């Protein structure tokens, strides 16, 4: 049996006649289109998120230290109550309570600055820069965190409607220091049992982890808080 070579013209005629009858997913044009779509999706999925990498990286330490700040407020409220009661039922001495409470407030001021202004504890850009909602709550009048944001008055603080959350934060810090001055006893006996954060580099002037708080640090924190109370507002620091 002898084989004859099929002419190229016949092959092209067969291909042309068969192509219109091929299923869509077998055609070369379909494969080309799908390939371009896949390449476009891959490139887009890399290029677009890369514009927000800095924001996404910054969001982690910001939310972390906002949570730490909230936990420190709760710890400060608990220790303040124990310091005022001084009923002997706490497993901490008065000096340990006072020293730990002051150390907590120093760390609260550091974390608050990191969350709001950035440039410390791994937070590159503070919420003051990129979050209008944060600024609305912190610095504007009213209390948008309530169901009725126009009604901020309480029996103990009737002027709350005239200030934002930042002013309340300053007054909270000042109130804790006032309680420390009144109920803390001898400052020479103050010993902190609460270490500072080791996760990120400390800001300039911050006490090292686990250090005992001092009268000088207490005075510095008081002075910074007083300054923030006088000039409090968007863009100011405690």
Image (tube, helix red, strand yellow):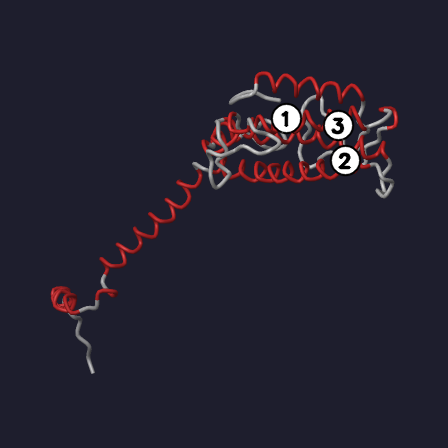
Label 2 vs 1, first from the N-terminus: 1
Using the image as rendered, state which of residue 178 and residue 111 is in the foreground: 178
**Viewport quadrant of the C terminus:** top right
Image coords of residue 112 (percent x, y): 61, 30
Which quarter of the figure has residue 118?
Answer: top right
Q: Is residue 61 above or below residue 182?
A: below
x, y percent for residue 49: 43, 41
Element class at badge 1: helix
Q: Is residue 76 left or right of residue 30?
A: right
Residue depicted at x 54% and y 35%: 58
Q: Horizontal and vertical percent for residue 189? A: 88, 28
**Of callouts 3 and 2, the N-terminal one:** 3
Q: Quadrant of residue 190?
A: top right
Nearest to the observer: residue 32 or residue 83? 83
Q: Position of residue 230 (x, y in %)?
A: 60, 16
Q: Are marks 1 and 3 in contact (CB under 8 Å)?
A: no
Mark 3 crowd level (few <14, some 14–19, many ≥20, 10 Å Cα): some
User: Height in image: 170 above or below 57?
Assistant: above
The residue located at (47%, 30%) in the rendering is 136
Q: Foreground: 209 or 6?
A: 209
For marks 1 and 3 on the same chain, the one whose residue lies earlier in the sequence? 1
Of badges 3 and 2, nearer the viewer stands: 3
Q: Residue at x 27, y 58 (%)?
A: 31
**Mark number, residue 195:** 2
Q: Rounded to the nearest whole Å, what is the CA distance between mark 1 and mark 3?
A: 12 Å
Residue 179, numbered label: 3
Residue sitting at the far bottom? 1
Q: Secondary structure at mark 2?
A: loop
Neighbor class of circle 1 (other Cα within 10 Å; few <14, some 14-19, many 20+) is some
- Identify the residue position indicated by label 1 in the image: 171
């Amino acid at each position: 049996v002898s084989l004859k070579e099929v002419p190229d013209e016949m092959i092209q005629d067969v291909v042309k006649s068969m192509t219109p009858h091929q299923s869509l997913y077998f055609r070369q044009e379909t494969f080309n289109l799908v390939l371009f779509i896949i390449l476009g999706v891959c490139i887009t999925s890399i290029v677009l998120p890369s514009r927000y990498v800095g924001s996404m990286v910054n969001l982690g330490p910001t939310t972390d230290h906002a949570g730490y700040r909230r936990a420190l407020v709760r710890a400060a409220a608990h220790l303040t109550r124990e310091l005022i009661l001084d009923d002997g039922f706490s497993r901490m001495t008065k000096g340990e309570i006072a020293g730990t409470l002051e150390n907590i407030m120093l760390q609260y001021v550091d974390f608050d600055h990191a969350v709001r202004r950035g440039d410390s504890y791994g937070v590159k850009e503070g919420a003051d820069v990129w979050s209008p909602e944060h600024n609305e709550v912190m610095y504007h009048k009213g209390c948008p965190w309530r169901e009725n944001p126009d009604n901020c008055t309480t029996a103990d603080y009737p002027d709350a409607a005239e200030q934002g959350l930042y002013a309340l934060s300053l007054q909270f810090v000042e109130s804790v220091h006032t309680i420390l001055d009144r109920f803390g006893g001898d400052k020479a006996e103050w010993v902190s049992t609460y270490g500072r954060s080791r996760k990120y580099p400390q800001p300039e002037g911050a006490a090292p982890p686990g250090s005992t708080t001092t009268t000088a640090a207490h005075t510095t924190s008081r002075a910074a808080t007083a300054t923030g109370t006088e000039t409090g507002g968007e863009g100011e620091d405690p």
